[in-house]
Image: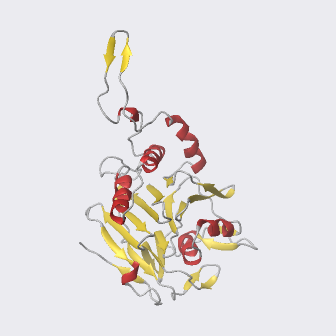
Amino acid sequence: MCTGIRFDDNNGNMYFGRNLDWSTGYGQKVVITPKNYRFRSAFLGDLAMKYPVIGMAIIEENTPLYFDCMNDAGLGVAGLNFPGYTHYETGPIDGKFNVSAYEFPLFLTANFKTVDEVEKILTNVAIVDKPINEKFPTSMLHWLIGDGKRSIVVEYTKDGMRVHDNDVDVLTNQPTFDWHKENLRNYMNLENSMPEKVTWGSSDIQPFGSGSMMRGLPGDYSSPSRFIRVAYTNTHYPTKTTEAENVCRLFHTLASVAMVDGAAKMADGQFEKTIYTSGFSAATNTYYYNTYENFTIRAVSMSDYDLDGSDLIGITDNR
């Protein structure tokens, strides 16, 4: 399971991040795909890259399999687990840009700089169930896509592709995004204000303190509950100005829905936990992350690397 968020600093700079929740990692690391890397698409052939891309990925067959990634123009994409609902095309569709699920994040961030541009191309995109090899089966995902102005959610189901405007700028997992949005109506009572005392008969009843108007905010790790919790936190967090303040906001917001080892058992008997938390600042083109074992927030700046090269750049930090 996973959680993703987006917000901006009111100056058009996006902050975009996610938790990746699972029982174990995949050997992932920060990977930069420079502009002269030859992107070999499964169906579209060699594609030139307009923008360099950074994110968390594993490299297989010299291809970055991004869990989340962003480009230096300020567009971000994160794939979140969506089992039971995802239904890709079984083969390429004539007249469409056919893209496999594993290359979809790179396809978007390598070629487009805004959500508006992405929305236009998506009307002619088909996502095909084609894994990169037998080692890595196709992941059943939906995607949060954001820039400095707004975000959308892309879901591919039996009804085809659906693109949802995301005015709360968050995403978790199943059910569908429109179900989550409808479910928000069950929590319209939540407030961040300090309650006033009330009088019952001759008794004045005083509040225990701040947070009393949040009663009913779900605290479990299920996808519907995490959606409500992160939507509340993300939309109520005060707007910040500096890079440090916004990175702090990003990691604290995602920490509100982070999963702790031993609390939620999966079907295979393993426990789900937040393997890593990541975030990207479009203001400085810096990718931030920490891991379950190491809370230290590490930073990788795109400006420190050759963005005009042709070879993938894998960044390993064993701290």
Report the side of 166 relative to 248 (left or right). right
Q: Is residue 272 visible?
A: no
Q: Foreground residue, 155 or 270?
A: 155
Q: Position of residue 240 (x, y in %)?
A: 39, 57
Snapshot quadrant of residue 2: bottom left
Q: Foreground residue, 60 or 202?
A: 202
Q: Residue furthest right?
A: 95
Snapshot quadrant of residue 114: bottom right
Classify 224 as above or below 255: above
Report the side of 47 relative to 65 (left or right). right
Residue drawn at (32%, 16%) of the image: 204
Q: Residue furthest top?
A: 202
Q: Is residue 153 visible?
A: yes
Classify 310 as above or below 251: below
Q: Position of residue 239 (x, y in %)?
A: 42, 54
In what quadrant of the picture does the N terminus appear? bottom left
Snapshot quadrant of residue 104: bottom right
Q: Position of residue 7 (x, y in %)?
A: 47, 58
Report the side of 170 relative to 95 (left or right). left
In what quadrant of the picture does the C terminus appear? bottom left
Q: Position of residue 153 (x, y in %)?
A: 58, 58
Q: Residue furthest left?
A: 319
Disc tally is 0
Colouring chosen for the image of the structure: secondary structure
